[in-house]
Every structure is written in C-alpha cells, then in structure tokens.
Amino acid sequence: MSRFAVLVLLAATVTGCARTPVVPDAPAAPTGFPNHTRAQIVAAVAAAVAPVRAAAADGTVAITSSRLNQEATFSLRARLTGRRSDSLTVVVRGPLGIEGGRGLVTADSLFGVDKLNRVLYLGPASAAERYVPGAGSPEAAARAVLGLLVPESQVAWSVRADGARYLLTGDIGGGVRRVYTVDPALWRVVAVREYDRDGQLRGQQDVSAFEMVQGVPMPRRVHLAASGSEVTFEHRRLALNPTDLRLSFTRPDYRVAPLR
C-alpha cells in the first residue's frame, strides 16, 4: 500500500442527510468584484466555512498511483474547531464491505492501519503535508478532503482576478509557492496548486459539484494529487455538526512502518 493511500485512510465522509438542490454552476459574482483586497477575500472565505464545526459523511474514493489502482468506500468523522482536541478518523472498505483500513489524525500524530497486510503506519501529524498541501493537522486534513480550505491569513498573498475568480499567490516558506483559486460567488477555495523552489508542481486540489447541505454550499467531488498519486473523493452523504460524533480508534499490535 502506498504512503499516499495511508492518507486516504485519513479522509472521507460518513452518515448524512438528504441532498438539497445543487448550487448553480455560475452564480453571480458579489458586489465589489474584482476589487476585493486579500484581507477581504480571506475573511470572506473563512466566514463561508465557519458554520462547519464538525462533519460526518460517507462516499466512494478512487486511488491511482504507480502501484495502486482501486476504488473503495469510506467513512469519516472530524472536528474542525482549531483546537488541540481536534481529531479525524476514517474507515475504508473494499468489495463486499470488508474493512481494508482505518486511520486517525490527532494534533500530534498520524496513524494508518492496513488491516489486510497487518501494518501500522505511524508518524507525526505533519507527515500529511507530504501528500496533501496544507494538511499538517487533523483540522487541515479534514478541511482538505471536505473542500473547506481557507488561505492562511498571515501570508502576504498577491491577488489578481482570472475570469470570474480570484487567484491568491504567495510564498509559504521553504521556497514553496502556493496558489489558491477562490470562487467569489461562493467564497470558497475551488483549487489549490503548490510549487517547489524550481517551479515544479508538487501537490494540487480541485473541488467541484457544489450542493447545499444544511444551508452550506459543500463540494460533492474533491480531487487530490501529490507524490505521484491521485485520489478522488465522491461525497455521497454528508452531515454537518452532527450531535453524535463518535471518534473511535484502537491501535492494533501490527508491524510498525514509520512515516516522516
């Protein structure tokens, strides 16, 4: 199992509610476009995703790499409050509903259980950054998979309009440049690109097929690519801020494979 597949164990969506009408593909841009400042854009995106404090959902996931090409179903529970108590759990099931793995991200650690091969992947939470840009914490990993990313407020983003969207480009440290595409009609990040110091693409995210869930626009499809692997999540059902958010994970006595 590829290391990127371990992150797949740490991202998904579980039980939910019936879908409400799909958000129009091209809603009108807000008043003030294309002259919003970077502070206004970041604040608007943060406000748009603020109602989501926790999530539970289920769906399907397709994983493609040089060593892996498979589809599975997944389930996820996540708290998104920005606290050290935040955590993310996920279960991946293969054909006939057989559990292939489960995972956990805490504020400090990342665990991925490959039940088929009896391997426990273990590393710091920051290891997720290698596979999903910006996903170095349980909150950030869940936001990446659920399509709830917010540009970092401390970065001095340059802003330009590209058609009906904004592009925010900035240096996030270590010679890494990140580009967020923001749809101002929804005030949501719809794409992320990350480049190394040589200008080579090292990771990306695309979200699409937005629909209203409990009054909040949520993407039905999230595509991630990094480290030569790609994963596409199709969120079939999604519940926001569920009252019963069970986050369970038991560490098995398996062979340990470190993640760095």
Image: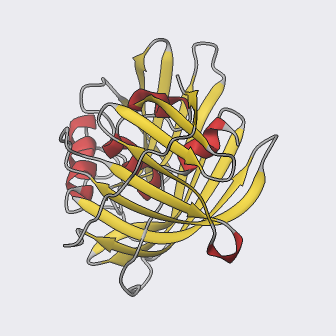
User: Which residue: 82% across, 40% down?
Assistant: 66
Q: Is 241 placed above or below 126 here?
A: below
Relative placement, left or right, of 114 versus 44 is right
Residue 115: where, in percent of width, then height? 61, 52
- Is residue 205 in view? no
Residue 255: where, in percent of width, then height? 60, 34
Residue 168: where, in percent of width, then height? 41, 35
User: Which residue: 62% across, 74% down?
Assistant: 97
Location of the N terminus by quadrant is top right
- The tally of labels here is 0
Question: What scheme was used to colour the molecule?
Answer: secondary structure
Q: Is 97 placed above or below 35 here?
A: below
Q: Is 153 placed above or below 16 here?
A: above
Residue 209: where, in percent of width, then height? 52, 70
Q: Nearer the viewer, residue 11 or 97?
A: 97
Q: Nearer the viewer, residue 134 or 85?
A: 85
User: Which residue: 53% across, 51% down?
Assistant: 9
Where, by quadrant of the figure, is residue 79 drawn? bottom left
Where, by quadrant of the figure, is residue 99 drawn? bottom right
User: Which residue: 29% across, 35% down?
Assistant: 107
Q: Nearer the viewer, residue 182 or 3?
A: 3
- Is residue 121 in view? yes
